């Protein structure tokens, strides 16, 4: 079964001012409640802000803001929280030069048999007719792949590669990026429209990673 490694929403910008994101401002705009903001892990400075609340973390630096989820797979309210936090922030800062918006979703897949992973990689990602196949005949070779296609109003990029976990177990890592470069006209509306795609994006990514692990992963 695929194990989640991280989920976040990123809005890239130019000259985003972290000092705006004071505790008072966040509470006044009803982005977070004062009671939810945790002292441990939260940092407020003119150069960077990191706000930790139950299940979420908001990071703001001059070129981006990022909302991360600690347990997105178990939280049915993720889409609402994205709109409440990211959607409300961009609405309150409409003159900020926002450049792009994206979702990042990651999973790792552990094989039932560690010895099988090398052959599984070869079967899945290196066709015999690949012109480079003859250079990777050794048993210590590893393989991955990159795939990309249009998704709704944006673009999906999927990167799959072998990784070794801290415990020493070999696995495959699947990293999904759903991305939209914003047009000059109405960037805030484009961001809101894109944020509304979280659920279908998550459903597609989970379907893909589940299919990838079918028959061999734990």
Image (cartoon, rainbow, N blue to C red):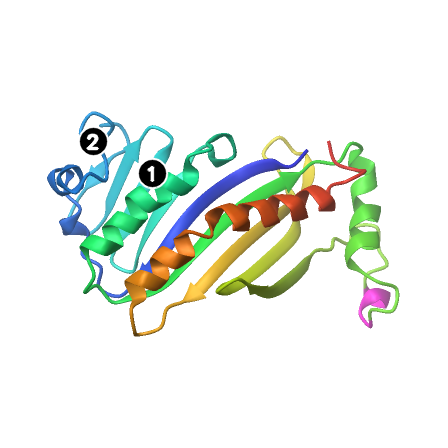
* 112, above or below 22, in the image: above
The N terminus: image quadrant: top right
Locate residue 195 relative to residue 159 in the image: left or right: left
Residue 172 at least partly seen: no
* 163, above or below 184, in the image: above
The residue at the point 24 percent across, 58 percent down is 62
Q: Which residue is mark 1?
A: 57
Locate residue 176 relative to residue 88 in the image: left or right: right
Indicate yes or no whether the magenta region holds residue 208. Answer: no
Toward the top, the furthest residue is 35
**Front-most of residues 176 and 144:** 176
Q: Residues within 10 Å of mark 1 (few under 14, many from 20)?
A: some
Q: Earlier in the sequence, mark 2 or mark 1?
A: 2
**Front-most of residues 143 and 104:** 104
**Main SS, magenta residues:** helix
Mark 2 and mark 1: span between their CA atoms? 14 Å
Indicate yes or no whether the magenta region holds residue 132. Answer: yes
- Residue 44 on image: x %, y %: 18, 41
Q: Which residue is mark 2?
A: 33
* 141, above or below 23, in the image: below
Q: Are marks 2 and 1 in contact (CB under 8 Å)?
A: no
Residue 198 at least partly seen: yes
- Residue 65 on image: x %, y %: 31, 52
Bounds of the magenta span? 131-135
Secondary structure category for the residue under label 1: strand
Locate residue 58 relative to residue 94 in the image: left or right: right
**Front-most of residues 58 and 168:** 58
């Amino acid at each position: 079964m695929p194990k989640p490694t991280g989920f976040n929403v990123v809005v890239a910008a130019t000259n985003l001012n972290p000092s705006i994101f004071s505790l008072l401002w966040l509470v006044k705009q009803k982005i977070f409640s004062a009671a939810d903001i945790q002292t441990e892990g939260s940092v407020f400075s003119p150069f960077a802000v990191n706000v930790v609340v139950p299940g979420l973390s908001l990071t703001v630096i001059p070129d981006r803001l990022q909302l991360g989820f600690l347990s997105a797979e178990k939280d049915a309210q993720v889409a609402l929280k994205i709109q409440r936090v990211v959607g409300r922030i961009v609405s309150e800062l409409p003159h900020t030069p926002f450049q792009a918006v994206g979702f990042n979703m990651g999973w790792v897949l552990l094989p039932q048999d560690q010895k099988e992973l090398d052959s599984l990689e070869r079967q899945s990602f290196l066709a015999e007719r690949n012109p480079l196949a003859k250079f990777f005949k050794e048993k210590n070779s590893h393989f991955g792949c990159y795939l990309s296609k249009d998704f709704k109003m944006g673009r999906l990029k999927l990167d799959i590669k072998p990784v070794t976990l801290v415990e020493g177990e070999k696995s495959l890592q699947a990293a999904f990026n759903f991305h939209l470069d914003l047009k000059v006209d109405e960037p805030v509306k484009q961001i809101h429209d894109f944020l509304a795609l979280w659920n279908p994006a998550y459903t597609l990514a989970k379907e893909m990673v589940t299919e990838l692990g079918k028959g061999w992963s734990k």
